[in-house]
Image (cartoon, grey):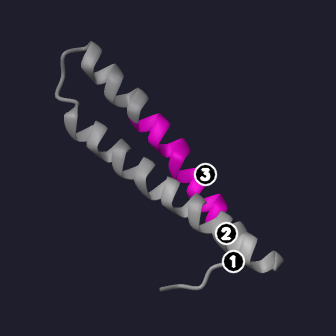
């Protein structure tokens, strides 16, 4: 596993959460137009999962660095 600085992990996590919001919006727009959309929402859930995991790891590493 890469030993990234907590600030880099936080930036990656926030970026993934923003990407998740964009993907959810895109999926919703596809749903409104009656096009297939479920794969986009799965992508958004994946982005949200990875983003929240990275943010949590960043906060844990930052609190360890303060000790």
Which of the two residues, 19 or 49, is positioned nearer the viewer here? Answer: 49
Q: Which of marks 3 and 1 is nearer the N terminus?
A: 1
Q: How crowded is mark 1: few (under 14 residues within 10 Å), some or many (20 or more)?
A: few
The residue lying furthest to the right in this view is 66
Which of the two residues, 10 or 61, is positioned nearer the viewer here? Answer: 61
The residue to which callout 1 is attached is 5
Q: Residues within 10 Å of mark 3 (few under 14, many from 20)?
A: some
Q: Residue 5: image x %, image y %?
A: 69, 77
The residue lying furthest to the front in this view is 67
Q: Say whether marks 1 and 2 touch (CB < 8 Å).
A: yes
* Horizontal side of residue 5 vs 21, given as left or right: right
Q: Does the magenta stretch include residue 12?
A: yes
* Horizontal side of residue 47 vs 31, given as left or right: right
Main SS category, magenta section: helix
The residue to which callout 2 is attached is 8
The residue to which callout 3 is attached is 14
Provide the residue span drawn in magenta: 9-23
Q: Residue 23: image x %, image y %?
A: 40, 37
Secondary structure type for disc 1: loop
Q: Distance between the residues labelled 3 and 2?
A: 10 Å
Q: Which of marks 3 and 2 is nearer the N terminus?
A: 2
Residue lying at 58% horizontally and 68% vertically, measured from the top left: 57
Q: How far apart are marks 1 and 2 (CA)?
A: 5 Å
Residue lying at 67% horizontally and 69% vertically, measured from the top left: 8
Residue lying at 27% horizontally and 43% vertically, measured from the top left: 42
């Amino acid at each position: 596993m890469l030993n990234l600085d907590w600030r880099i992990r936080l930036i990656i996590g926030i970026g993934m959460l923003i990407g998740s919001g964009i993907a959810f919006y895109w999926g919703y727009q596809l749903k409104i137009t009656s096009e297939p959309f479920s794969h986009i929402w799965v992508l958004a859930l994946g982005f949200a999962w990875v983003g929240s995991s990275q943010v949590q790891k960043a906060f844990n590493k930052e609190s360890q660095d303060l000790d």
